[in-house]
Amino acid sequence: MSALPPDEPTPAQRWFALAEEDLAAARVLIADGSAALRIAGFLAQQAAEKALKAGLFAALLGAPRIH
């Protein structure tokens, strides 16, 4: 088995990047002021869940990825 290329993101990195995108979108909606705050709240909640999932992947799958 060979290790995956080092530049390929881990599952934890992919989930955390998605969380960052959701949080950034929530911040844009809040700053805009014209969007419903419930949508920003939903995106913030999604960001939190994705960040937690990233943490679980990092904790449970800390070994190098191989295939």
Image: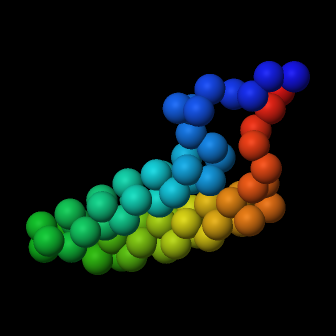
Residue at the image point whose x is 69% and y is 28% from the top: 4
Left or right of 42, for residue 3: right
Residue at the image point whose x is 62% and y is 60% from the top: 54
**Quarter the C terminus occupies:** top right
Q: Can residue 53 be seen in this view?
A: no
Q: Where is residue 20 in the image (x, y as percent from the top left)?
A: 40, 59
As drawn, which residue projects farthest toward the right?
1
As drawn, which residue projects farthest toward the top?
2
Depth check: give the residue in front, 48 or 9. Answer: 9
Left or right of 57, for residue 10: left
Q: Where is residue 58 in the image (x, y as percent from the top left)?
A: 68, 60
Q: Where is residue 9 in the image (x, y as percent from the top left)?
A: 56, 39
Residue at the image point whose x is 55% and y is 66% from the top: 51
Left or right of 34, for residue 65: right
Depth check: give the residue in front, 36 or 21. Answer: 21
Q: Where is residue 59 in the image (x, y as percent from the top left)?
A: 74, 65
Depth check: give the residue in front, 34 or 17. Answer: 17
Residue at the image point whose x is 62% and y is 53% from the top: 12
Q: Which colour scheme is used?
A: rainbow
Q: Is residue 60 visible?
A: yes
Left or right of 53, for residue 60: right
Q: Which quadrant of the view contains residue 56?
A: bottom right
Q: How many marks?
A: 0
**Quarter the N terminus occupies:** top right
Depth check: give the residue in front, 31 or 60. Answer: 60
